[in-house]
Image (cartoon, rainbow, N blue to C red):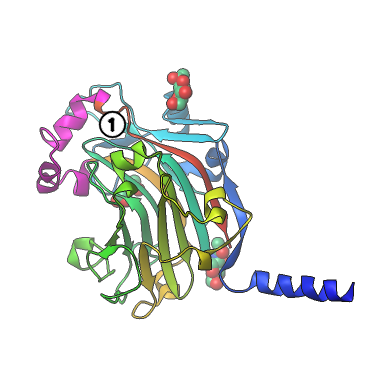
Amino acid sequence: MFTFKVFALFNILVFVRGATYSQTDSHTGTGFLKSFTVESEADPTHGRVNYVNAATAASLNLTYASGDTFILRADSTTVLSASGPGRNSVRIQSNKQFNNSVMIFNIRHMPEGCGTWPAVWTVGPDWPNGGEIDILEGVNNQGPNQVTLHTGSGCTMPSSRSELGTPAQNNCDANVNSNSGCGVKVSDARSYGPTFNSDGGGWYAVERTSDFIKVWFWSRQATGIPTDAMNGATSVDTDNWGTPQAYFPSTSCPISSMFAPQNIVINLTFCGDWAGASSIYAASGCPSTCVDYVNNNPSAFTNAYFDFAWLKIYQ
Ligand SMILES: *[C@@H]1O[C@H](CO)[C@@H](O)[C@H](O)[C@H]1NC(C)=O
Ligand SMILES: *[C@@H]1O[C@H](CO)[C@@H](O)[C@H](O)[C@H]1NC(C)=O
Ligand SMILES: *[C@@H]1O[C@H](CO)[C@@H](O)[C@H](O)[C@H]1NC(C)=O
């Protein structure tokens, strides 16, 4: 009996140390609509979008929740007037903020289509000083996914570091390089757009500590996915997750002062500063101009939707 108690205590001590986290928040189906607020603000990145409010989103079925399905999508039936508002779509923001934590997104489908610019990201107050972590983001169906940090001044990344992805640019400061941030291209072609969707999506996981930010991606078709992440277990151990796709150490970036508590944002815009930049849109092989295409081809956006199985958060 004594031996057992000592053994149990030892286990508890081990359990709370290291990279083991306990689940604090679990979102699935209608739970997303309780923990997130639909925001109908204007898009600061000049997208050809009209972010509708919660009631409109629900009545147009642009948000839909049932069982373990949560859908967030854009309108795919309306031809737009060139002089009127942009395509109806949805932006949601978490009611809670998170400091150091692990977040796992189990996503079955993400928006695709020429002109689409979907994003799953976290952001602090007083941008860019509160920091921004772009977990899943891209434009015009062009994979792979790029994970990017945007910060205030004084945050750079070492060019050589232990990650599977390929760094694009190493200065995270949003005030330089036209706010391109420090991005890392994921090494797995299944990480974005049509390929992500045809494989049934997958899992994105983010771990934030004072010492680093790490992002992992596992396609649903991958083998050797850590079972705690795959199942959204009640506790997870990131030490067993292997080399991340993107690794942002605090070596020359004081993570704890560059990143304030963050809200989670999920949105889908069209065209705008990134997807609609004429050189970028043309280089993606998409037809016409971005705005004309988005205005005139509603049926091209039938697959412009997110389908989340769940989002779980650990601290
Ligand atoms: C929507 O997402 C894009 C991509 O991250 C972002 O740049 C833009 O500011 C977002 N729009 C809103 C209204 O938050
Ligand atoms: C709303 O969307 C869901 C998911 O795509 C679909 O199953 C349902 O039939 C739609 N409802 C209406 C009224 O169109
Ligand atoms: C985040 O950390 C700061 C500083 O320790 C603390 O004041 C704040 O309450 C924390 N916020 C959340 C949402 O945990």
Residue 93 sits above or below residue 102 on the image: above
Q: What residue occupies the far right of the structure in this picture?
A: 1
Which residue is rendered at x = 57% and y = 40% of the image?
A: 31
Q: Is residue 288 magenta?
A: yes
Residue range highlighted in magenta? 271-299
Q: Is residue 138 above or below residue 30?
A: below
Percent coordinates x, y for residue 238 in the rendering: 52, 65
Location of residue 184 with respect to 200 vertically, above or below: below
The residue at the point 22 percent across, 28 percent down is: 84
Is residue 197 visible in the rendered structure shown here? yes
Magenta span includes 114: no
Residue labelled with disc 1 = 87
Percent coordinates x, y for residue 212 in the rendering = 43, 72
Q: Position of residue 41 (x, y in %)?
A: 36, 42
- Residue 100 visible (yes or no): no
| Residue lying at 17% horizontally and 43% vertically, measured from the top left | 276
Which image quadrant is residue 159 in?
bottom left
**The quarter of the picture showing ligand 3:** bottom right
Circle 1 residues within 10 Å: few <14, some 14–19, many ≥20: many
Determine whether the residue tagged by mark 1 lies in a helix, strand or loop.
strand
Q: In the picture provided, is 193 more to the left or to the right than 282? A: right
Where residue 163 appears, as percent x and y from the top left, is 35, 67
Disc 1 marks a residue whose amino acid type is: Arg
